[in-house]
Image (cartoon, rainbow, N blue to C red):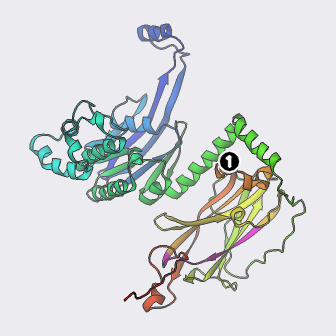
């Protein structure tokens, strides 16, 4: 294993035998597995390395194999094939209350857990005050943990694992039960551990945390390693998988569809069907066009982004804007197959992955065709006020379609129903970047507000005496 590698996974897999009766299970124990033995593959063979001092994210829907992989890394499970090599002490928060004796006090559980992790005696007494201060549960440290709330459980558990200075720290959704202040404190601590060379493996359904903290992300789906690499691309593929799975199960969710249909029938709203969709053609700018046809794009391939352009309000090609100028984003798509109602959108995020703003043509309320045909070219332009803080920003692009009848009655449909029915045909991550500079160098022209975005705030000031 290279010196800068903390974890090395080689051809690792886990599968479980399936027995349909107790007698068959006993027969297998006595005489061994039959050649035709049924089994379930919780994790299919995969290989990867995690560098020392890195943040490694693992994402996937429920049942994708995340917890199985973590338990294999921790040595809790025995692999069916392959191997895991780990350098140093591993601390893990795999599930709420794991490793705690409910009859022991918090202090006793802290001592027991620390001893299991190789910290005992004088060293434990040295770090105990730090554990108590971080957990911040007061006198409950000397009460049986069976009296703890879920928040107190995770506070103590995280404090124990983080304060022993492990070489590898695994966090599996444990922080989800903490309040925002505790989560911020935890991530601040994780940053300090990382600076000291600790490798952090983070499993969470919070894509914002994955985007903000992780250097590399592994995406699992039904035991398969679908993607390993950049956080942005991993998250895009995660959402794409979610929509594919939603479409696969949409026929089974008859009650939801019946509810939507009933609301449509009960509606008296007049819907203008745009069979003959006609709007003024979008005039493409003369300069600044970027060819996207060779860029990697995720989706089902039924739509391809061909070119984009970025200009100011008068059509001059720009990548640097002053605050409060209008950015015009032009995007062109080629339709590969006949599709339902199209919607194009964008997301603006910081270089740290924080999403600042995102919107699509459906949310903007602009007219859309009921169908697009194979070979047609669709163009969209967004006018975006640069009411943002100075700095560098990245734009992601996307193109989706909705079932026409559902889109027609979007006002009667919940966002969850709309999202479940959407088909994402094209996603282009990091399509382009731009910068924002202040309108002046001095005074409030240089800093008209604090933070990442301007909102429509106002002020009044008076003298009472």
In this rendering, would 177 be left or right of 309? left
| Vertical relation: 34 (above or below) 437 | above
Q: Position of residue 166 (x, y in %)?
A: 25, 47
- Foreground: 339 or 271? 271
Magenta region, residue range: 379-391
- Foreground: 85 or 137? 137
Sort mark 1 into few (<14), some (14-19) or many (20+) by Cα contacts within 10 Å.
some
Residue 381 lies in magenta, yes or no?
Answer: yes
Q: Position of residue 44 (x, y in %)?
A: 50, 34
| Vertical relation: 364 (above or below) 46 | below
Name the residue at the front extreme: 465
Q: Position of residue 195 (x, y in %)?
A: 28, 60
Question: Dot 1 lies on which element?
Answer: helix
In this rendering, would 465 be left or right of 401? left
Query: Where, quadrant-wise, is the C terminus in this rendering?
Result: bottom left
| Vertical relation: 247 (above or below) 438 | above
Q: Position of residue 329 (x, y in %)?
A: 66, 74
Report the label total. 1
In this rendering, would 395 be left or right of 122? right
**Residue, disc 1:** 417
Q: Is residue 455 visible?
A: yes
Q: Residue at x 33, y 36 (%)?
A: 97
Q: Is residue 336 visible?
A: no
Q: Quadrant of residue 262?
A: top right
Query: Where, quadrant-wise, is the N terminus in this rendering?
Result: top left
- Foreground: 176 or 261? 261
In this rendering, would 69 be left or right of 375? left
Q: Residue at x 46, y 7 (%)?
A: 27
Residue 39 lies in magenta, yes or no?
Answer: no
* Main secondary structure of the magenta stretch: strand
- Foreground: 36 or 411? 411
Q: Residue at x 39, y 39 (%)?
A: 70
């Amino acid at each position: 294993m290279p010196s800068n590698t903390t974890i090395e996974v080689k051809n690792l897999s886990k599968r479980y035998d399936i027995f349909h009766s107790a007698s068959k299970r006993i027969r297998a124990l006595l005489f061994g597995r039959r050649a035709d033995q049924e089994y379930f593959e919780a994790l299919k063979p995969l290989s990867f390395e995690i560098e020392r001092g890195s943040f490694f994210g693992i994402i996937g829907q429920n049942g994708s194999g995340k917890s199985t992989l973590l338990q294999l890394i921790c040595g809790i499970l025995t692999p069916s094939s392959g191997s895991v090599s780990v350098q140093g002490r591993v601390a893990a928060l795999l599930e709420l209350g794991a490793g705690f004796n409910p009859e022991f006090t918090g202090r006793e559980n802290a001592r027991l857990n620390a001893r299991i992790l190789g910290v005992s005696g004088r060293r434990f007494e040295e770090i105990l005050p730090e554990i108590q201060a971080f957990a911040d549960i007061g006198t409950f440290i000397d009460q049986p943990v069976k009296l703890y709330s879920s928040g107190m459980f995770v506070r103590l558990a995280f404090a124990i694992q983080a304060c022993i200075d492990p070489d590898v720290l695994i966090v599996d959704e444990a922080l989800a039960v903490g309040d925002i202040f505790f989560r911020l404190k935890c991530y601040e601590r994780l940053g300090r551990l990382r600076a000291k060379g600790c490798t952090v493996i983070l499993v969470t359904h919070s894509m914002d945390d994955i985007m903000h903290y992780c250097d590399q992300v592994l995406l699992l789906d039904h035991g398969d390693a679908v993607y390993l690499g950049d956080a942005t691309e991993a998250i895009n593929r995660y959402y794409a998988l979610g929509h594919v799975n939603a479409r696969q199960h949409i026929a089974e969710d008859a009650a939801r569809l019946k509810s939507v249909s009933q609301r449509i029938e009960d509606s008296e709203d007049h819907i203008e069907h745009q069979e003959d969709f006609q709007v003024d053609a979008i005039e493409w700018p003369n300069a600044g066009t970027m060819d996207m046809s060779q860029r990697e794009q995720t989706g089902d391939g039924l739509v391809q982004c061909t070119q984009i352009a970025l200009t100011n309000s008068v059509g001059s090609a720009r990548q640097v804007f002053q605050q409060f100028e209008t950015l015009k984003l032009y995007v062109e798509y080629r339709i590969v197959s006949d599709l339902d109602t199209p919607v194009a959108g964008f997301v603006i995020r910081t270089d740290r992955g924080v999403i600042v703003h995102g919107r699509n043509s459906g949310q903007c309320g602009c007219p859309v065709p009921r169908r697009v045909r194979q070979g047609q070219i669709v163009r969209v332009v967004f006018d975006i006020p640069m009411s943002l803080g100075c700095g560098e920003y990245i734009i992601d692009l996307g193109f989706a379609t909705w079932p026409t009848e559902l889109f027609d009655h979007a006002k009667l449909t919940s966002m969850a129903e709309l999202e479940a029915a959407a088909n994402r045909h094209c996603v282009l991550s990091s399509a382009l970047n731009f910068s924002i500079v202040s309108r002046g160098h001095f005074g409030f022209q240089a800093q008209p507000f604090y933070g990442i975005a301007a909102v429509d705030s106002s002020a009044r000031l008076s003298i009472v005496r």
